[in-house]
Amino acid sequence: MLETEENYLRALKIVVQVFKEPLEAQLPNLDSGLLTKAEISQIFAKVPPLIDVHENICRTLQSYIMHWMNERLIGKVWLDHAAELTPVYKAFINNYDTAIQTLNECDQTKPKFHAFLKAAESRLECQRNSLPDLLVRPVQRLHSVVLLLKAILEKTDRKNPDNAYLIKAKRAVEAALTEANESRRQTDSYAMIFKLSSEIERCPADILSSARTLKTELHVLSLGGEDEWAKTRNKRMAIFLFNDLIEIVKVRTGNDDSSTPTRRSFSNYSLTRQLSFSVLRHGKKKYKHHQQYMLASIRRIQSLVHADISGVFVLSFRVSQGEDFWVAQCLENQEGELEKFLREVADQTGVTLCTVD
């Protein structure tokens, strides 16, 4: 436990001492060709708070080992610091993608920084680790601590006073890891929705919500329907399924052939916030908003089986005047994609999926 903590803390300090501080020292030199203050912050700002927490943990563990007694409680050390782990790891993991993207962009576009990076990485203390190798350590650390606590617990007698602390510490570190990962998932999900909303002309503003997650999408050919849906006949459209609503859009001309993707799942989608903002620089938007329905308004989902045409389905919606229905044909290029999509809609809405011959 102590050895791994010392190695981890050493890696964090290398990031600061070998990379961050020399770059900051060059800031007064406007012609250095290295990094700006903002770029340094994006890459390194979340590392020092990790060092502060782990220095305290490491110092206590070192004291225990140097003056070992059977009454020493390793589990209590981690339990005492568990509350400090959550905020610093949430901040680091949420910023990790941005840090790596900024690092890669600067490495590729700034020759002097590239040279600085290679020279720094070749130093003896880096032990052949690149800066990305060092920056990924915090992403892995809490999981490693959980495994170490579990291993110590398995070898600790149940009557040992540390047994109870090890159990609590393991749970507390697991909770910190879970909260950090969940925070990142929410951040990534919001970034994905932001990116999508920026690609849809006249997209309803209220689609942006921290409680909303984008589940999947389906590209279709509209075959028409009632009222407004009759006007969409023979138009290429896309359906975006969220956890609480569906957004149905028209696919603009020029985005309806080679750019039509295979249905994707967004449950593990990871997107940097920088990338999400980059879409604002584009001109003509890929989609145009047509209709949006809360999932609770979906009344029926029917897959139609026909000898001469495949992939046809019907969605019907409750509206103030009664019921609207829309018929469409799946355009996805993988077998079974329509069934997967309709099943996911049914699961999200609780509506029974029907098949009509």
Image (spheres, rainbow, N blue to C red):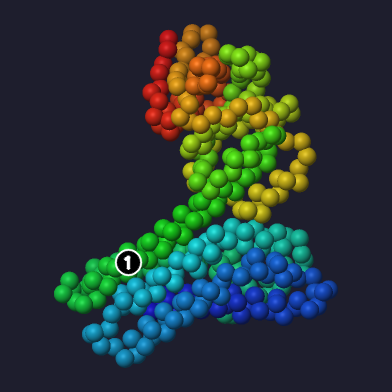
Residue furthest toward the front? 320
Q: Provide residue 278's location: percent of width, then percent of height.
A: 71, 49
Q: Provide residue 201's location: percent of width, then percent of height.
A: 70, 34
Q: Residue at x 72, y 80 (%)?
A: 25
Q: Which residue is drawn at 55% across and 78% down?
A: 13
Against 36, residue 233 (above or below) is above
Quarter of the picture containing the N terminus is: bottom left
- Left or right, residue 160 beside residue 258: left
Residue furthest toward the left? 159
- Left or right, residue 134 beside residue 357: right
Nearest the eye: 111 or 221: 221
Question: Tag count in the figure?
Answer: 1
The reply to whether residue 276 is visible in this rendering is: yes
Residue furthest toward the bottom? 67
Quarter of the picture containing the C terminus is: top left
Q: Provide residue 83's location: percent of width, then percent of height.
A: 41, 70
Q: Residue at x 55, y 59 (%)?
A: 94
Q: What's the amino acid at mark 1? A: Lys
Query: Dot 1 surroundings within 10 Å: few (below 14), some, or many (20 or more)?
Result: many
Q: Residue at x 73, y 26 (%)?
A: 253
Against 260, residue 101 (above or below) is below
Against 215, residue 163 (above or below) is below
- Left or right, residue 112 beside residue 270: right
Label 1: state its secondary structure.
helix
The reply to whether residue 315 is visible in this rendering is: no
Rendering quarter of residue 165:
bottom left
- Left or right, residue 155 beside residue 27: left
Q: Name the residue under label 1.
A: 170
